[in-house]
Image (spheres, grey):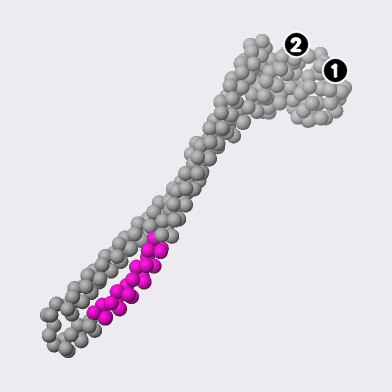
């Protein structure tokens, strides 16, 4: 006699264990490093590089302005230190200072534009930093929750594995060999028959097949889904 009752219990325990293991696999996919982290870090690095370049341009522009102002002050001082005697030379000096001031004005506008660009880039970098921090906190919280679920499922899987092992210890090696061979092909090995209908594929089974299955002397397979039919 094939132990269909015990095999049915084993199959149901195996299926419950399969479902729990599948949930663990799904959680494992979501655990670990966030998928967006690499892209976000690359964006932060790129923005920082732009900011560094703009910062360099801004410092160079400020140094240029400082040099121009220093030269204007130096040339302007000559107008009053008595070193220039001739009116023509004085006029030339005034014109030179005027040209220097005009050049300073022309240089101030690009310098101001660079400063505005730097401010905008710094704001973008600050936004990315805030986004990274906030997203990381949210991710960490979700990871903690997922890990908790996984731990609970792992505990459940351990209990179910003990149940599976318990049923297997009560079933003969011959019956287990038949069960394991079918189990490799499909998750549902044993199909309960209710009202002459296969519990797996819902096919109405022939009477002769049901009669053989009731004897329980050999495994009888459903002609449609190939499950071993179990007539209670």
Q: To which residue does mark 1 refer?
A: 211
Q: Determine crowd level at label 1: few under 14, some 14-19, many 20+ residues with C-alpha closer than 10 A.
A: few
Q: Which residues are magenta?
A: 97-118
Res. 72 image quadrant: bottom left
Q: In this rendering, does residue 181 appear at all?
A: no
> Is label 2 in a helix, a strand or a loop?
loop
Q: How many marks?
A: 2
> Is label 1 in a helix, a strand or a loop?
helix
The residue positioned 42% from the left and 58% from the top of the image is: 121
Left/right placement of residue 230 relative to residue 12 reads right
Residue 70 locus on image (x, y percent):
22, 70
Helix, strand or loop: magenta stretch = helix
Query: Residue lying farthest bottom?
Result: 88
Does the magenta run of residues contain 19?
Answer: no
Establish if 174 lies above or below 65. above
Please state which of residues 155 and 95 is positioned toward the viewer in this rendering.
95
């Amino acid at each position: 006699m094939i132990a269909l009752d015990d095999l049915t219990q084993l199959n149901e325990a195996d299926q419950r264990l399969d479902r729990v293991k599948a949930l663990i696999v799904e959680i494992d996919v979501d655990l670990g490093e966030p998928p967006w982290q690499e892209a976000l870090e690359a964006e932060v690095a790129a923005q920082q590089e732009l900011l560094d370049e703009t910062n360099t341009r801004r410092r160079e522009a400020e140094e240029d302005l400082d040099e121009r102002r220093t030269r204007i002050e130096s040339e302007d001082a000559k107008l009053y230190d008595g070193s220039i005697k001739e009116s023509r030379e004085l006029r030339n000096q005034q014109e030179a200072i005027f040209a220097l001031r005009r050049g300073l004005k022309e240089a101030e506008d690009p310098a101001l534009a660079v400063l505005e660009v730097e401010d905008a880039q710094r704001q973008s970098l600050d936004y990315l930093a805030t986004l990274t921090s906030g997203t990381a906190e949210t991710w960490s919280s979700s990871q903690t929750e997922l890990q908790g679920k996984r731990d609970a499922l792992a505990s459940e899987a351990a209990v179910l594995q003990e149940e599976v092992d318990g049923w297997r210890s009560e079933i003969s090696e011959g019956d287990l060999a038949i069960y394991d061979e079918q189990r490799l092909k499909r998750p549902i090995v044993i199909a309960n028959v209710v009202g002459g209908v296969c519990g797996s594929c819902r096919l109405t089974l022939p009477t002769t097949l049901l009669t053989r299955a009731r004897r329980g002397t050999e495994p009888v397979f459903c002609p449609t889904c190939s499950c071993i039919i179990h007539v209670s």
